[in-house]
Amino acid sequence: MGALGVVTLLLLAGPASDVDGGGTEAAPPLERIAFAHDSAELTAASLARLDAVATTIKGRPQAFPTVALDGHGADDEHAAMKLSLARASTVRLALIARGVDASRLLVRASGATAPVCTQQNEGCRARDRTVEFVVLAAAKPPVAAEAEKPAAAQGEPAPAKPAAADPMPLVGVEFKKASAVIRPEALGELDILAGFLKSTPASIEILGYADRDERHAPALAASRAQAVRAYLRACGVSDQHLIARAADGGAKCRTRDEACHARNRRTELRFVETGAPARAAGDAAAAPARWP
């Protein structure tokens, strides 16, 4: 945590820097997203504004390679740090739902420690109940040597394309070994997701994983997914928008160190893309996991 008490939810690979004019597209300013007092719920006006923000970010990747979502709170709000994190996380979910790549979004929160306005009146405090967009990590132009590589000679095999990386999950929920009980530290993120889903209906796939050294791993993975589904339902999310199942392939990591084992004891939640093959909502047995 920095000197100002800023909370960062996701980490970037490598140092971040503001976009400048060194051969990259200048990023136009994006208007802050405003919230009501003591609320992290998006208003109709905010949702319309996020439609425009998402279109801009998707359409100008050179200008917006990575965008920090800086959540703020006013000094008269209850639990301003937690609230500012919830606001930034809610904006992240809304942008992902509108097609922005999750890996380009960084959630940060400063509570009431970095006020935009310091006057003690409602107009000033309203300016602090916002999420601000900050452009980070300017995209690097291609290296000349790579850009000028000659095409493969006739008859030569084309170079293999790198495997596509898994999309970044909306939320990852870790579990203790051999357990399907949600850990208390994961409930905050699930609460934020539940609040978003109640105001903006979208279908979520909950993929359960288990480690190879856990007994009855396929059943345990399905139980973990169902535990997250049950929690979201208890928070008021409609069951018709929740698909819980054991992930195809089982484990995410194949090495034998503890960090790898921990990665396998989890669930991951993702938006279901429009037009994707449908699975039975809430049915963990709809697609049996292929376990190694």
Image (tube, rainbow, N blue to C red):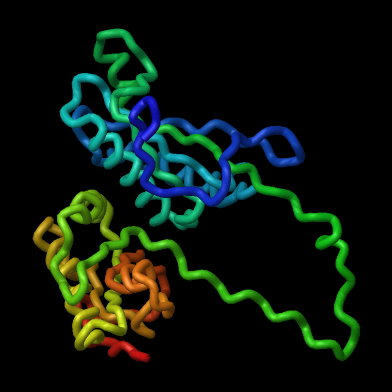
From this viewpoint, which residue is outermost toward the left? 234
Which residue is at a point 36% across and 46% down the rendered structure image?
A: 9
Quadrant (top left/top right/bottom left/bottom right) for the C terminus: bottom left
Which residue is at a point 22% across and 67% down the rendered structure image?
A: 175
From this viewpoint, which residue is outermost toward the front? 257
Residue 205 image position (x, y, % from top left): 30, 70
Quadrant (top left/top right/bottom left/bottom right) for the N terminus: top left
Q: Within the image, what quadrant is residue 216 found in?
A: bottom left
The correct choice, above or below, for 209 with respect to 259 in the image is below
Task: Judge whether residue 33 can be spotted in this image.
Answer: no
Residue 283 image position (x, y, % from top left): 20, 81
The correct choice, above or below, for 277 with respect to 120 in the image is below
Which residue is at a point 81% across and 62% down the rendered structure image?
A: 146
Task: Indicate left or right for 9 with 156 as reference.
Answer: left
Task: Judge whether residue 77 can be spotted in this image.
Answer: yes
Residue 245 image position (x, y, % from top left): 25, 79
